[in-house]
């Protein structure tokens, strides 16, 4: 079993914080992604994606684009995993207090193997991800979810504290 964690840093003055754990039991099993975020816009959906780089030197802009090692287009977590970007995680919905919980089993996200997400990043966007269906010029590349409000680097977790 491999366990990773991503602790979020607020982009600018957004105030978004939280953490997500990623657990993959075996190389061929899905990765369980779960955690809590705070400080989001209340009662709103926010796009969430794994990005290519775990570089936080220039805030979220140095995290790069959505992780896409096979050159696919942007899509929804409910789409066929073979047809969408590896980093597409869809949306999380904030409650009336601006808090959101995420818990998904994701077959495209891997901790083991050549396309591991260890050392990459996760970003949270200000708006909803249109999951490639919005008709906007950015729909098929970014989901047109607006500016990034939080980001974090995915690192290995100490298994005794997970």
Image (cartoon, helix red, strand yellow):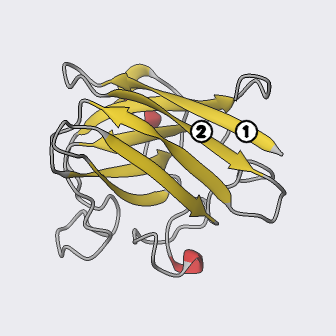
Marked residue nearer the N-terminal end (1 or 2): 1
Q: CA distance from mark 1 to mark 2?
A: 7 Å
Name the residue beneath numbered marker 1: 3
Is the C-beta separation of discs 1 and 2 under 8 Å?
yes
Q: Position of residue 65 (x, y in %)?
A: 42, 47
Query: What residue is shown at x 60% (from left), y 67% (from top)?
Result: 70
Q: Position of residue 9 (x, y in %)?
A: 39, 22
Residue 131, compared with residue 97, is above or below; it is below
Q: Residues within 10 Å of mark 1 (few under 14, many from 20)?
A: some
Find residue 144 and name its label: none
73 or 33, nearer to the observer: 33
Q: Secondary structure at mark 2?
A: strand
- Dot 2, crowdedness within 10 Å: few (<14), some or many (≥20)? many
Quarter residue 99 falls in: top left
Name the quadrant containing residue 3.
top right
Q: Is residue 138 above or below residue 153?
A: below
Question: Where residue 100 sits: x, y (%)?
Answer: 33, 43
Closer to the camera in the image, 54 or 78: 78
Above or below — where is 85 with respect to 160?
below
The answer to whether any part of residue 70 appears in the image is yes
Q: Nearer the viewer, residue 101 or 67?
A: 101
- Please state the horizontal and vertical placement of residue 6, each as a whole percent of the image: 54, 32
Residue denoted by label 2: 21
Q: Residue furthest front?
A: 96
Residue at x 18% of width, y 76% of height: 135
Residue 66 in sight: no
């Amino acid at each position: 079993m491999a366990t990773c964690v991503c602790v979020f840093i607020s982009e600018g003055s957004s105030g978004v914080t939280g953490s997500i754990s990623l657990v993959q039991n075996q190389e061929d099993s899905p990765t369980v992604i779960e955690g809590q975020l705070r400080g989001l816009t209340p009662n709103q959906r926010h796009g969430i994606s794994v990005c290519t780089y775990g570089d936080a030197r220039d805030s979220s802009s140095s995290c790069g684009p959505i992780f896409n090692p096979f050159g696919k287009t942007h899509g929804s977590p409910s789409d066929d995993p073979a047809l969408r970007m590896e980093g597409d995680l869809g949306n999380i919905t904030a409650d009336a207090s601006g808090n959101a919980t995420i818990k998904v089993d994701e077959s495209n996200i891997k901790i083991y193997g050549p396309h591991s997400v260890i050392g990459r990043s996760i970003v949270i966007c200000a708006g909803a991800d249109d999951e490639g269906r919005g008709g906007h010029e950015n729909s098929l590349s970014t989901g047109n979810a607006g500016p990034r409000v939080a980001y974090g680097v995915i690192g290995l977790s100490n298994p005794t504290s997970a």
